[in-house]
Structures are given as structure tokens and as C-alpha cells.
Image: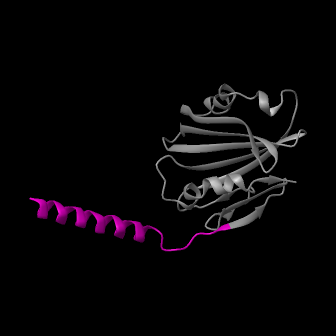
Amino acid sequence: MKKLLLLILALVMILILAACGGETSESVTLVDVTTEIGISLKLPNDMAKQDSGAYANMETGDSAGFGVTEIAGDPLSGATEEDVLALYQSKYDDVVVTSFENGKQINGKEALVSQVNLKTPKGNEVTIILVMVTDDRNNYIVTFTHGKDKTEGALFQNLQACIDSITIQ
């Protein structure tokens, strides 16, 4: 019985290693990107710039979008989880804020980082990571989007490095 169990475990390990090795035929690295609105960061090199100024991998559906808004009233530190929820509830179904961190620092600037899971109008389940960084005049916004269960993509695998690299000019 022990020999059979060891044989099964060995076969499982071989299958796991084969699956891991087969999923990434290309090496993905992080490259420096500077947007037209003054946000610089690192993104996986498998994401291409789109006409809208966003970056996307059309095969995996991974994307990064950018925005900037002038601060008109409440400071970023006053933003709440409910505010993030309200941003998405009017357009999407099954919106759930799965993490919310305000008062963070990213490269010396006040920041908010929140993760939201939702369902698109066509029924796709996606995860959006909303990052807002402020310079006391403007809030610079970066959104990273990937399929909710798409954890093998370069964006998901390098997400923290992408967030940590955000700078504003």
C-alpha cells in the first residue's frame, strides 16, 4: 500500500511540474512605462499599449488603466471602503471589496490600494486593483484588471512590484 501511495504521489508531482513548466513558454519581465498623464511604473512586457493609453494583454485579458483627477474637497485620507464600493456598484453586479488600505505610502506619496471583485455585464468575473496616489493637488489613479481566477498571468504574478513602482511626476 505504501508503494502504491508513493507511486501516486510521484506521478502527481511529475504532472504538477510538467504543468508549471508548460504554462509559460516566454519569459516575462517588467519594463518601465511612463504615461502621458505623469504616472510612471513597471508593467509586464507582455502588455501592449492600447490606443486609449491603457496597456493590455489581449490573450489573457490583463490590463492597466490610468487617470488623474483634481482634488476637489475631501483629501484621499478621507476615502472609505464604501466610497470604493460606490465607484463600481452603479455599473457592475456582485461587487465585493476584498481589501482596502488607506494611508499607505508609495514612493513617498500618500496612497490608497483596494481590491474589488465584480461581475461584468457579460458575466465575466474580474478582479480590479484600484491604486490612488496623491500629490496634494491631484489624485493619480492606476487600475489593474485580471480575471478573478487568472493567477497564472504575468500581471497577477508581478502585481506587488507593479504597485510598488508607481511614481508620479
Extreme residue toward the front, this view: 2
Q: In this figure, what is the number of numbered marks?
A: 0
In the image, residue 86 lies at what x, y percent?
Answer: 66, 28
Q: Choose between 31 and 102: the one closer to the eye.
A: 102
Judge left or right: residue 144 versus residue 96: right
Residue 50 can be seen, yes or no: no
Residue at 82 percent of width and 48 percent of height: 108
Majority SS type along the magenta span:
helix
Q: Position of residue 45 (x, y in %)?
A: 64, 68
The structure residue drawn at horizontal position 55% and vertical position 32%, both measured from the top left corner, is: 96
Q: Relative to the observer, which residue lies in front, 116 or 108?
A: 108
Q: Residue at x 54, y 37 (%)?
A: 118
Judge by depth and name the residue closer to the eye, 157 or 117.
Answer: 157
Please state the extent of the stretch shown in magenta in the rendering. 1-30
In the image, residue 165 above or below residue 123: below
Tell me what residue is drawn at x 70 percent, y 27 percent: 80
**Residue 152 visible in the current orientation:** yes
Left or right, 106 with reference to 152: right
Residue 24: in magenta span? yes
Q: Locate residue 99: give its quadrant.
A: top right
Decide: is 127 above or below 40.
Answer: above
What residue occupies the far bottom of the structure in this picture? Answer: 26
**Quadrant (top left, top right, bottom left, bottom right) of the C terminus:** bottom right
102 sits left or right of 119 in the view: right
